[in-house]
């Protein structure tokens, strides 16, 4: 880790390392929060006490289960399912489900830990949780995906509920998978409980804008950061990594606000399109046909070129140019929207060399600690995901509100709520960073504000 922790905090971090061996992503997420506690470790020691930190770093409940299912060819498959119910100080556990072959307990714990502070920042009454499976949806038939989702829910259903734990989507889990999950839940419990999952389809309890919310929210946040220093997105060249749910709607909002997105990626490589991405074609290739990004370049014509991922296999970050990948494409604004640790030091150096002005995370923990240090050192405006990508879960909380009141709001009204929430998170970050002597530091602002609210609620509720 690039920077040393405050002397009071280092032994606590060492204890977390010893207690959770081998969980590198979880260690990284805890380190990033503990580093931000430095400004209060001296003069607000009540927040940096081990009695609180040791509880915050320990999930309330960790569920690991077998997910058996049968392929189209009749072969029995076993996957591992996870749900980590991290913290319920502020409300029912809330957070997505990820289906990706890389999923393990460390990844689910880092995501649940981050989610706790992100959800706190939204101002909505939601605790933190995360789940998923090492199931790989790629290349699976519709029938296989449905059977997997049904088997996954056959165990998960007993742990979730409107007042207990409310899952949603994440990598590999979108509208299709949520439909199969909700259907199986309803069949098992024999009740219509819309509030048990968010990200549902619009005709069966979903909220308008939930599909767009994470990408739109990230761009609203980036716009507010630029406005803070008297700039705007108008005319900016933007690189967005990923081409899934978050990336696609980040591209859409950037184009609506006058910027031009000139590159995006998937795990097979990245595409550079100097005329600006054709969003209709991108949606058709990725959302409808579920194709690789090279198909976009083939069909777009001469303005677009596809750069395959390098032999390092790191997808959006590893394509042979010193590890910089998509981040070697010169831009003013970079929005990492694919996955954790996809923006390494080499990428940050390339961005800085090419004069990037702002990096805002649409993904969770996409920037490595080394890369964060490089960006901050160079004075690049930088927003951590727990602030900038909070629009997705905030709109999930709006979906819960609509479900609870059996209501359904219009698109404009819901988007206005999202914009207002992102503006409030932005102000909270700026004011908190100012108050604790780190003006303009969104990492300190987001982590301190998110953390202190959770810690206060935990203290008020006693040692439970
Ligand atoms: P999707 O599954 O819709 O898209 C993920 C995108 O990232 C795809 O383009 C995928 O490429 C790429 N990707 C995933 N894993 C890797 C990898 N290991 N290497 C290279 N590329 C990869 O997921 P989302 O868009 O929903 O999620 C993206 C990020 O945003 C995640 O970090 C998620 O946790 C975070 N997030 C999501 C929210 C939501 O509401 N969905 C809310 C807040 C954060 P390919 O298709 O080739 O695998
Ligand atoms: O990381 C995230 O915030 C999400 N995947 C969305 C969680 C949610 O419950 O909407």
Image (cartoon, rainbow, N blue to C red):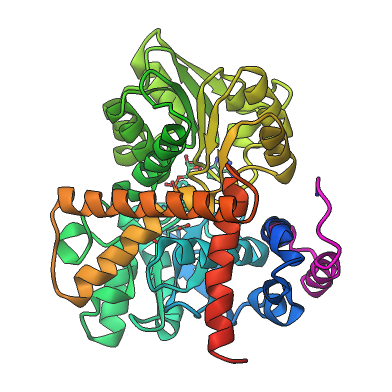
Does residue 81 show up? no
Q: Nearer the viewer, residue 105 or 119?
A: 119
Q: Image quadrant of residue 14?
A: bottom right
Specify the quadrant that holds the C terminus: bottom right
Segment tinted magenta in the rendering: 2-26
Q: Nearer the viewer, residue 419 or 283?
A: 419
Q: Residue at x 70, y 37 (%)?
A: 371
Q: Residue at x 45, y 80 (%)?
A: 155
> Where residue 89 appears, x then y in whole percent?
50, 80
Does residue 433 show up? yes
Q: Residue at x 72, y 39 (%)?
A: 373
- The number of numbered badges drawn on the structure is 0
Q: Is residue 102 above or below residue 112?
A: above
Q: Is residue 61 above or below residue 346?
A: below
Q: Is residue 3 left or right of residue 428?
A: right
Q: Is residue 234 left or right of residue 11?
A: left
> Where residue 162 appears, x then y in whole percent?
33, 80
Instruction: Please say whether residue 37 is one of the residues in the magenta stretch.
Output: no
Q: Is residue 98 left or right of residue 198?
A: right
> Where residue 107 appears, x then y in whole percent?
63, 60
Q: Residue at x 51, y 48 (%)?
A: 430
Q: Is residue 213 above or below residue 95?
A: above
Q: Nearer the viewer, residue 131 or 60?
A: 60
Instruction: Please say whether residue 14 is one of the residues in the magenta stretch.
Output: yes
> Where residue 331 appears, x then y in whole percent?
52, 20
């Amino acid at each position: 880790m690039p920077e040393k922790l405050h002397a009071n905090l280092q032994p606590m971090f060492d204890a977390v390392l010893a207690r959770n061996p081998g969980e590198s992503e979880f260690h990284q997420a805890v380190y990033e929060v503990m580093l931000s506690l430095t400004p209060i470790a001296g003069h607000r020691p009540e927040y940096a006490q081990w009695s609180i930190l040791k509880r915050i770093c320990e999930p309330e409940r960790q569920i690991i289960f077998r997910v058996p299912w049968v392929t189209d060819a009749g072969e029995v498959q076993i996957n591992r399912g996870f749900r980590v119910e991290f913290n319920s100080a502020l409300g029912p556990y809330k957070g997505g489900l990820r289906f990706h072959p890389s999923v393990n307990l460390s990844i689910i714990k880092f995501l649940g830990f981050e989610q706790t502070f992100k959800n706190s920042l939204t101002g909505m009454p939601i605790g933190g949780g995360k789940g998923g499976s090492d199931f790989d949806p790629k290349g699976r038939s519709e029938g296989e995906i449905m059977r997997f989702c049904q088997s996954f829910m056959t165990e998960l259903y007993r742990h979730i509920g409107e007042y207990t734990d409310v899952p949603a989507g994440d990598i590999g889990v979108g509208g299709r998978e949520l439909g199969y999950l909700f259907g199986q839940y309803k069949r098992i419990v024999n009740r219509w409980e819309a509030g048990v999952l968010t990200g549902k389809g619009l005709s069966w309890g979903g909220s308008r804008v939930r599909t767009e919310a994470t990408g739109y929210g990230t761009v609203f946040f980036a716009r507010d950061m630029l406005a803070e220093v008297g700039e705007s997105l108008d005319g900016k060249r933007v690189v967005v990594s990923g081409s899934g749910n978050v990336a696609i709607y980040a591209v859409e909002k950037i184009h609506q606000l006058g910027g031009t997105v000139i590159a995006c990626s998937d795990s097979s490589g990245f595409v550079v399109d100097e005329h600006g991405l054709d969003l209709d074609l991108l949606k058709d290739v990725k959302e409808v046909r579920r194709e690789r990004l090279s198909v976009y370049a083939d069909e777009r014509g001469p303005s677009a070129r596809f750069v395959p991922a390098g032999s390092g296999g790191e997808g959006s970050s590893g394509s042979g140019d010193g590890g910089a990948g998509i981040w070697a494409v010169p831009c003013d604004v970079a929005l990492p929207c694919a996955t954790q640790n996809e923006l390494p030091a080499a990428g940050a150096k390339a961005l800085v060399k090419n004069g990037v002005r702002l990096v805002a995370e649409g993904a969770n923990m996409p920037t490595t600690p080394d890369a964060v240090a490089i960006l901050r050192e160079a004075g690049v405006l930088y927003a951590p995901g727990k602030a900038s990508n909070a629009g997705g879960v905030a709109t999930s909380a709006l979906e819960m509100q609509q479900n609870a009141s059996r209501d359904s709001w219009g698109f404009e009204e819901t988007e206005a709520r999202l914009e207002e929430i992102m503006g409030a998170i932005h102000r909270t970050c700026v004011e908190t960073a100012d108050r604790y002597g780190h003006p303009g530091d969104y990492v300190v602002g987001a982590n301190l504000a998110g953390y202190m609210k959770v810690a206060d609620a935990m203290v008020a509720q006693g040692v439970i």
